[in-house]
Amino acid sequence: MTIELTIKELVASRTAFIALLQEKITPKAAFLVSLVQKKIEPELKTFDERNNELIERLGKEGKRGKEITPDNKEAMSAYNNEMSPILETKVNINVDPIDIGILGQKEITGGIISLLSWLFVIPKEEGE
């Protein structure tokens, strides 16, 4: 199945994938989630490269290399203007939704589920 997402949604999902894979979940759940993570990684890598290029071009030398700080309003505005269309770019990810029941009785934060809502499905009960 192909799922259409924006780069913004993928970037937001990154931390949720990391957090979920740090939890003790079933081996099958960990395997399926890691497969999806591998499928989105190329898109995230492209985003990171574009982000770094913008920072390199627009930023000023700081304590940790080039950076764009809020006090540099011109650079911040230029960065936001160039980053906005990148974040709204739609990409197609070929993944099958994962039955949320595979996570078992593990308690997962609402934040993780919210950021990964595009990935999980709740199967219909018999008779629904």
Image (cartoon, rainbow, N blue to C red):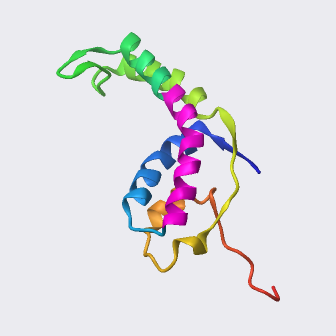
Q: Furthest residue to the right?
A: 127
Query: Residue 83 at what x, y percent from top left?
Result: 52, 26
Q: With respect to residue 69, does 98 lie above or below?
A: below
Q: Furthest residue to the bottom?
A: 127
Q: With respect to residue 89, does 39 lie above or below?
A: below
Main secondary structure found in the magenta portion: helix
Q: Residue at x 60, y 27 (%)?
A: 85
Q: Furthest residue to the left?
A: 63
The total of numbered circles placed on residues is 0
Task: Answer with the quarter of the image where residue 123 lies.
Answer: bottom right
Query: Residue 108 at what x, y percent from top left?
Result: 44, 70
Q: Residue at x 57, y 71 (%)?
A: 102
Q: Quadrant of the C terminus?
A: bottom right
Query: Residue 87 at what x, y percent from top left?
Result: 57, 33
Task: Answer with the quarter of the image where residue 72 lies.
Answer: top left
Query: Residue 71 at what x, y percent from top left?
Result: 27, 24
Q: With respect to residue 15, does 59 lie above or below?
A: above
Question: Is 32 colored magenta in this rendering?
Answer: yes
Q: Residue at x 42, y 49 (%)?
A: 15
For the residue pair 107 and 51, the one nearer the viewer reads as 107
Question: Is 46 colored magenta in this rendering?
Answer: yes
Q: Which portion, as a residue range, is magenta?
A: 27-47
Q: Residue at x 58, y 37 (%)?
A: 7
For the residue pair 124 and 82, the one nearer the viewer reads as 124
